[in-house]
Image (cartoon, grey):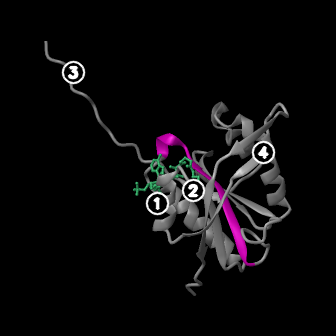
Amino acid sequence: MTARELSNFTVRVDVQLRLAIRADLPKLEWFGQYTHYRTLFKRAYREQQEGRRLMLVADCNDFPIGHVFIQLQSDENAIADGYSRAYLYSLRVMELFRGRGIGTRLLREAEAHVRSRGFHWTTIAVAKENGGALRLYERLGYQIFRDDPGIWSYRDESNETHWVNEPCWILEKPLVDLH
Ligand SMILES: CC(C)(COP(=O)(O)OP(=O)(O)OC[C@H]1O[C@@H](n2cnc3c(N)ncnc32)[C@H](O)[C@@H]1OP(=O)(O)O)[C@@H](O)C(=O)NCCC(=O)NCCS
């Protein structure tokens, strides 16, 4: 008896980049993987409604398989000042979909959103240990301008505080107006 031949086939999926809607909030938890960031997602969405942040998602069949968030204002003017510099953060693509250009497209679309609001710079932070993401940012024109201890905290879905200690590089990129 001969072994049955393996059947290989290709599945094409359509991905759309758009701003998050309320219905995305539970889906952003990725079936439990990011439940601990529930409060952060809610705050980002509230601030998107107030015009202070943007949540850009890569939508596949009504599910956010990737995202990058944009902070237009912050207490720290060097990363986001409300008119010239905006901070991109929380760039993440579901593991199954990585290495197919979605992260690059999210970053480019985020830059276009920022540019269309009259900003001239984007900034982004990357953990010093995350060499892959640093390579991606440098390829897209970001340059390191300083480092940061990367100490911050969040409250999880049970209101418990967690501290993150992740030394990082802060990068910036000038947004050249192509028009
Ligand atoms: C970084 C990340 C968003 C890139 O998304 P992506 O859709 O895979 O990106 P693209 O396909 O456009 O580009 C792939 C590039 O991403 C980088 N990368 C980093 N981690 C990667 C991973 N686990 N798998 C694939 N690429 C990765 C590589 O530099 C790769 O470039 P290369 O071809 O030179 O190796 C994604 O890998 C991810 O979600 N990682 C976990 C979260 C994270 O580290 N976010 C960045 C925080 S600063």
Q: Is residue 115 above or below residue 151?
A: below
Q: Is residue 37 above or below residue 134?
A: above
Coordinates of residue 84 in the picture (x, y in percent) = 73, 78
Residue 16's disc is 2
Going from N to C along the chain, the mark reached first, 2 or 3, is: 3
Amino acid type, callout 4: Ser
Amino acid type, callout 2: Gln
Going from N to C along the chain, the mark reached first, 2 or 1, is: 2
Coordinates of residue 21 in the picture (x, y in percent) = 74, 52
Location of residue 71 (image quadrant): bottom right
Coordinates of residue 88 in the picture (x, y in percent) = 66, 62
Residue that label 4 marks: 153
Residue at 73% across, 71% down: 78
Assess mark 1: CB under 8 A from ligand 1? yes
Magenta-tinted stretch = 84-97
Horizontal side of residue 114 vs 65, given as left or right: right
Distance CA(mark 2)–CA(mark 1): 25 Å
Distance CA(mark 4)–CA(mark 1): 26 Å
Residue at 74% across, 44% down: 25
Q: Residue furthest top?
A: 1
Horizontal side of residue 105 vs 18, given as left or right: left
Residue at 68% across, 43% down: 28
| Pair 3/1: label in front | 1
Residue that label 3 marks: 4
Residue that label 1 marks: 135
Q: Residues within 10 Å of mark 2 (few under 14, many from 20)?
A: some
Distance CA(mark 2)–CA(mark 3): 38 Å
| Pair 2/4: label in front | 4
